[in-house]
Image: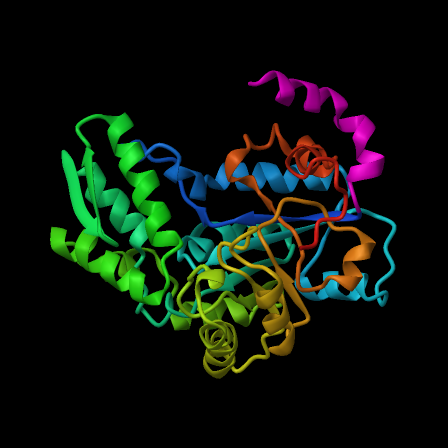
Amino acid sequence: MSRIDSLLRIAAPFVRPIYGGAGVILMFHRVLPRETHTRIRGHANLEITPEALEQTIHYFARRNYDVYSPDDLYRFLTGVKKEDKPFVQFTFDDGYVDNLIYAYPIFKKHNIPFTINVSTCFPDHTAVIWWYLLEDLILNRERLTFEHAGQTYDFDCTAQEGKAKAFAITRKLFKFANIQERGLLTNSVLLANDMDLLRKIDEVALRWDQLKQLASDPLVTLSAHTVNHYVLSSLRDEEVQYEILESKRILESNLDKQIDHFAYPFGNRREAEAREFRIATECGFKTAMTTRTGGIFSAHGSHLMTLPRYDLAQLTLPRDLNLVTSGASSLRVNRFKRVITA
């Protein structure tokens, strides 16, 4: 624990009245039992255990938080819903099958709502889940070599430190690649090493019938999360519009349900900015969530397309939740700015 972290924990009760806000949106990805096999350092942060999820729910219940759906939040921010209690909203990104297997029974037991932001390439089973394929590749290689954009990358992967370095650098290349560059990387890194591009999708993704099962429960909100989960700022205007609007259309067509909310994939600064916010507004959503760190204030009623969320992947649950609810985490990341919008 760093000295700054220690100071923030001490300061949390004192900064809460200023930085705590009206409530928080929490971001998760996967819920899985604890595994013992080797992982790339840091990549398991996409996953929490069912026990950690339940502890998080208990944390907010003990503090008398309301649990909001996206529609509840929209009504609050537009002044329709009046509330004097703090709130929390639980969201899961991408569309992993463990959201149904492990998360859904927990939320059902507590009778509280949650949201899954679905990239439609998951249930369509067209997703190349490169982040897990890349982890598998590096874990099983002593060396990774490839060429991209005129540069040769050569990583010694015999030790865990080398594997982590290879993963971090190659992941960044994949993450910020545009459509054409992503295809080239897929060929030079994955196909060149005989990786089955669709192997992971059968293992980890929700199917349409499972999404329909979830959508039939009033506790569950399904929201759009683009078609192919690109960093939107790397795409051209027409590609951004297609990714956002088509994901809404596909979800509505398959689920026979209106989709009113959206979450930007990789929605941090540099990854989703003014252009993306404008296009999301034009696509008719009520709200859109970023991955910028921060709490929700009533002032976000004027910034419905830029709602911040807390990514709990970097925190120890439930110990660090005081840093979230007090706004101390946001204070540190955002240098004392309260209302995080653009």
Q: Residue furthest top?
A: 3
Relative horizontal placement of residue 204, taking residue 67 as reference (left or right): left
Q: Nearer the viewer, residue 200 or 226?
A: 226
Colour mode? rainbow
Relative horizontal placement of residue 234, taking residue 13 as reference (left or right): left
Relative horizontal placement of residue 228, taking residue 188 as reference (left or right): right
Instruction: Say which quadrant the C terminus sits in.
Output: bottom right
Provide residue 32's location: percent of width, then percent of height.
Answer: 41, 44
Residue at 52 percent across and 80 percent down: it is 252
Provide residue 185's location: percent of width, then percent of height.
Answer: 25, 56
Q: Which residues lie in the magenta part?
A: 1-21
**Whether residue 176 can be seen here:** yes
Vertical comparison of 156 with 111: above or below: above
Provide residue 103's location: percent of width, then percent of height.
Answer: 50, 51
Instruction: Say which quadrant the N terminus sits in.
Output: top right
Q: Main secondary structure of the magenta part?
A: helix
Residue at 62 percent across and 16 percent down: it is 3
Is residue 227 highlighted in magenta?
no
Residue at 68 percent across and 71 percent down: it is 286
**Whether residue 39 can be seen here:** no
Is residue 18 highlighted in magenta?
yes
Residue at 79 percent across and 45 percent down: it is 21
